[in-house]
Amino acid sequence: MIKAVIFDLDGVIVSTDEFHYQAWKLMADQECIPFYKTINHRLRGVSRMESLTIILEKAHQSYSEEEKVKLAEFKNQAYVKSLSSLDETHILPGVLQVLSKLKKMGVKVAIGSSSKNAQFILKQIKLFDAFDAIADGHDIIHSKPAPDIFLVAATKLGVEDHACLVVEDAVAGIIAAKRAGMFAFAVGDARKSVEADYKADDIKELIEVVKNSR
Ligand code: B16
Ligand code: MG
C-alpha cells in the first residue's frame, strides 16, 4: 500500500533545467569550455559539484579544488538571479490536481530534490506549504543515484520506505528510488529507465497507481 508520494522537483514539479543550462553556459563560455544541451542533459538530478565535474570533462586545463568551488559559486549566483523570474505559472501541467487529490486521499507528500535551492524555488512557485516534508541538497552528501535523498524524505514523513512512491524525470532518480526500496514512477526522460515500476506521459496517472495499491 502506497502511503506517501515523494516528488523530485526539477523536471517534475517545475522545469528549471533551462535556467540551470543558461547559468552553466555563462560559466562555460567564460572559461572557453564547450558546453551544449546534450551535456546539460546529463546534469539532471546530479548535484552542483558533480555537474561541474561532468562539464569540466571538456575543459582544456585542469582546475584546483578552490577554483572549482569558485566556478560552482559563479554558476549558482547566475542561476539564483535567473530564478527571480520564476512564479506559479511555471508549475508543470497536472501537478496541482495531483497534489490536491493526494491530500484528499490522505496520502502524504514530500519533495526529494538534489537542489540546495529547492526551498527558494518552492517559495517562488508558491508551493512551499503544499508538502508534508522537504528533503533537499542540504540534507545529503551523496546525490542521486544514491538513495539518500529519498530515505531522508521518508524519515521526515514518518513513512516506511517500502510504502513510498517516488516520481522522477531523471534515470539517476529512478535508480535512487529503487535503491531506497521504493516504488518508482517515471515521467519525461526517466521513462527510458528499465528499472521504473511505472511510466507515464501524464503525471495524473499516478492517482490510479496509488488507488490500486490500496
Ligand atoms: P543546485 P532535482 C537537481 O534538482 C537538478 O536536476 C540538477 O540539474 C542540479 O544540478 C541539482 O538539482 C543541484 O541543484 O545547484 O540548485 O543545488 O531534479 O533533484 O530536483
Ligand atoms: Mg529532476
Image: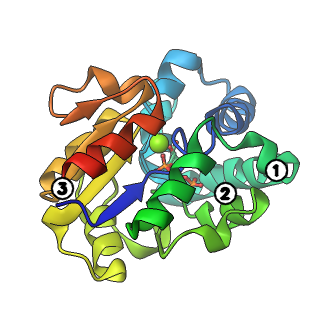
- Left or right: where 137 falls relative to 142: right
Is ligand 1 closer than 8 angstroms to the Cβ of mark 3? no
Q: Residues within 10 Å of mark 3 (few under 14, many from 20)?
A: many
Q: Residues within 10 Å of mark 2 (few under 14, many from 20)?
A: some
Q: Amino acid at mark 1?
A: Asp
Residue highlighted by disc 3: 182
Is ligand 1 closer than 8 angstroms to the Cβ of mark 2? no
Q: Which image quadrant for residue 1?
A: bottom left
Which residue shows up at 80% across the image and 42% down it? 89
Find numbered disc 2 in the image and state the secondary structure of the residue it sits on.
helix
Mark positioned earlier in the residue sequence (2 or 3)? 2
Which residue shows up at 19% across the image and 57% down it? 214
Across the whole image, how many numbered discs are drawn on residues?
Answer: 3
Which mark is on residue 73? 2
Residue highlighted by disc 1: 87
Residue 60 appears in the rendering: no
Q: Amino acid at mark 2?
A: Glu
Measured along the vertical axis of the image, is residue 75 above or below residue 113? above
Q: Nearer the viewer, residue 60 or 124?
A: 124
Find numbered disc 1 in the image and state the secondary structure of the residue it sits on.
loop
Which residue shows up at 41% across the image and 45% down it? 46
Residue 194 at x, y percent in the picture: 16, 25
Q: Residues within 10 Å of mark 1 (few under 14, many from 20)?
A: some
Measured along the vertical axis of the image, is residue 154 above or below residue 95? below
